[in-house]
Image (tube, grey):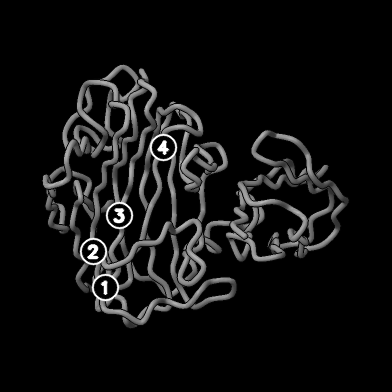
């Protein structure tokens, strides 16, 4: 499954038997792409990458990325966006956005984040800090993590050599904020750099999927084998951990500098962790069991 976008990209999802739209920037895509060139020095482009680290798309030959062949400029603010038509999802309790990405930026100085608008573009919220309709977020623990940029935005930042998936799930299940009662949701990807010149290559994304589902797409993927399910994420004073079965071992919580901030034994299938003592930021939680191995996940604290 693959999906869509644009440079201020506008993507519209309509209903189908699977309530799915996709765009992999190749053939047979069923989402229209519109690139807005009115934003000055918008460096997003669609094509075949020709860089040192960005050599190939996730599904060759095309992807969307920050410029085709050169490093990104300083003092840059670039966006692409798309519109999800919620009329295609009215019969589903969840709707999902998935994509694959890789990044090469100056850590905590340059990076990218995702915004959502529920009022047709009048106001925008960073989805990682949205206090009303924020989606559940699943990030491959082997991939790029979230951190705070110098601007204060929670964003993807740093360098990862491979493509990794990201899943965002809006819905009405346990731990999920309600689906916004609007006919469309606009999604915008923002790339921002500071005033210091850089030799990094930017951000590349591919294979966007937007679809409705009867099952929480994040909980479904987070069983005891691949890891565990965290909610709510971002945390609000406490975070619950669902393992799917009784797990015996140790839980460690790390801050963004890989320092252990809390550690305790575990013998349960679920637990609730007090996060009120933790400052705003990105944290990793790791479970280590004698019989089940090591599993890890990430959560965000915004308040």
Circle count: 4
**In the structure shown, which secondary structural element does the residue marked by tag 2 occupy?**
strand
Give the mark, 2 or 3, whose residue is nearer the N terminus.
Answer: 2
Q: Is residue 62 above or below residue 230?
A: above
Cβ–Cβ under 8 Å for marks 1 and 2: yes
Q: Which mark is residue 184?
A: 1
Q: CA distance from mark 1 to mark 3?
A: 13 Å
Q: CA distance from mark 1 to mark 4?
A: 27 Å
The local crowd at label 1, few if under 14, some if 14 to 19, many if 20 or more residues have their Cα within 10 Å, is: some
- Residue for badge 3: 188
Q: CA distance from mark 3 to mark 4?
A: 14 Å
x and y percentages locating residue 67 in the rendered image: 22, 30
Q: Quadrant of residue 75?
A: top left
x and y percentages locating residue 289 in the rendered image: 80, 45
Give the mark, 3 or 4, whose residue is nearer the N terminus.
Answer: 4
Taking the spot 39% from the left edge, 32% from the top edge, the residue there is 194
Asked whether, in this view, residue 153 is left or right of residue 227, the answer is left
Give the mark, 1 or 2, whose residue is nearer the N terminus.
Answer: 2
Q: CA distance from mark 2 to mark 3?
A: 9 Å
x and y percentages locating residue 7 in the rendered image: 19, 46
Q: CA distance from mark 4 to mark 2?
A: 23 Å
Give the mark, 4 or 2, whose residue is nearer the N terminus.
Answer: 2
Cβ–Cβ under 8 Å for marks 1 and 3: no
- Residue for badge 2: 83
**In the structure shown, which secondary structural element does the residue marked by tag 1 occupy?**
strand
- Residue for badge 4: 111
């Amino acid at each position: 499954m693959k999906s869509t976008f644009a440079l201020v990209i506008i993507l519209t999802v309509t209903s189908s038997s699977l309530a799915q739209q996709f765009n992999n920037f190749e053939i047979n895509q069923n989402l229209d792409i519109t690139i807005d060139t009115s934003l000055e020095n918008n460096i997003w482009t669609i094509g075949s990458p020709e860089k040192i680290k960005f050599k190939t798309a996730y599904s060759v030959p095309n992807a969307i990325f920050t410029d085709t062949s050169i490093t990104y400029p300083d003092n840059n603010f670039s966006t692409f966006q798309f519109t999800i038509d919620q009329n295609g999802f009215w019969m589903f309790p969840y709707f999902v956005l998935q994509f694959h990405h890789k990044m090469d930026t100056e850590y905590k100085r340059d990076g990218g984040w995702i915004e959502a608008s529920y009022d047709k573009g009048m106001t925008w919220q960073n989805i990682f800090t949205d206090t009303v309709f924020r989606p559940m977020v699943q990030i491959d623990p082997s991939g790029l993590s979230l951190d705070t940029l110098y601007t204060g935005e929670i964003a993807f930042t740093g360098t990862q050599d491979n493509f990794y998936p990201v899943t965002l799930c809006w819905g009405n299940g346990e731990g999920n904020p309600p689906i916004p009662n609007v006919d469309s949701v606009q999604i915008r990807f923002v790339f921002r750099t500071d005033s210091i010149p850089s030799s990094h290559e930017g951000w590349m994304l591919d294979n966007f999927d937007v679809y409705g589902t009867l099952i929480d797409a994040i909980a479904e993927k987070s069983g005891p084998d691949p890891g565990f399910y965290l909610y709510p994420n971002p945390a609000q004073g406490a975070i619950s951990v669902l393992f799917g079965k009784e797990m015996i071992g140790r839980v460690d919580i790390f801050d963004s500098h890989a320092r252990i901030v809390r550690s305790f034994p575990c013998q349960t299938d679920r637990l609730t962790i007090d996060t009120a003592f933790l400052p705003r930021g990105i944290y990793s939680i790791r479970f280590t069991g004698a019989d089940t191995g090591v599993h890890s996940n990430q959560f965000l604290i915004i308040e």
